[in-house]
Amino acid sequence: MVRWAENDHLFILGLLSLISATVGRTALRQRWRHWVSVRITGMGLSYILMLTAFYMDNGKNLPLWRELPQIAFWLLPAAIGIPLIVRALVRHPLARRASGKRYF
């Protein structure tokens, strides 16, 4: 049963995830300028948004997550995922080559 009034935040998260993944896929297929960075960012954000939606819906039923406050369901996926995306953007050889910068 769909409960739109109670699950509108899940719909928004799902829509944002779809948009983010579509941008990442399009960057790859059309080889946009800096396509590697756009792809890494788009796909990474899509995954973070999907995990956020999952934990918002199911976190209260999971063993470790049920002990956490509700705000953790919103923040933890991003707090873990965004540094991983930044690390990939800094370290991935194709992303470094595309930006023309050498960090290491």
Image (tube, rainbow, N blue to C red):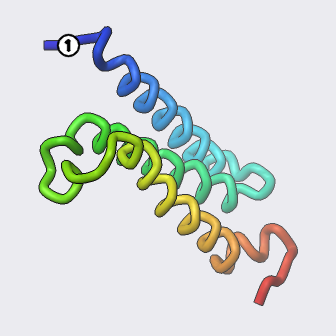
Residue nearest the viewer, comparing 64 with 5: 64
**Identity of the residue furthest to the bottom in this view:** 104
Name which residue lies at 22% across and 12% down: 3
Q: Is residue 29 above or below residue 92?
A: above
Q: Tell me residue 61's x, y (percent).
A: 13, 43
Up-down relation of residue 79 to residue 98 (above or below) = above
Q: Quadrant of residue 70?
A: top left
Q: Please provide percent x and percent y for residue 37.
A: 69, 60
Left or right of residue 43, residue 87 in this image: right
- For this rendering, which residue is in front, 89 or 63? 63
Tag 1: residue type?
Answer: Val
Decide which of 30, 95 is in the foreground and name it.
Answer: 95
Q: Is residue 68 left or right of residue 14?
A: left
Question: Where's the C terminus, which quadrant?
Answer: bottom right
Q: Count of labels shown? A: 1
Res 22 → quadrant: top right
Q: Quadrant of the N terminus?
A: top left
| Residue at image location 54% in from the left, 33% down from the top | 19
Residue 89 in the image: x percent, y percent?
66, 69
Q: Quadrant of residue 57?
A: top left
The answer to whether 12 is drawn above or below residue 31 in the figure is above
- The percent coordinates of residue 62 (x first, y second) are 15, 50
Q: Which residue is mark 1?
A: 2
**Label 1: which secondary element:** loop
Q: Residues within 10 Å of mark 1 (few under 14, many from 20)?
A: few
Q: Is residue 9 above or below residue 2?
A: below
Which residue lies at the image location 51% right of the left edge and 42% below the top edge?
21
Q: Residue at x 19, y 49 (%)?
A: 66
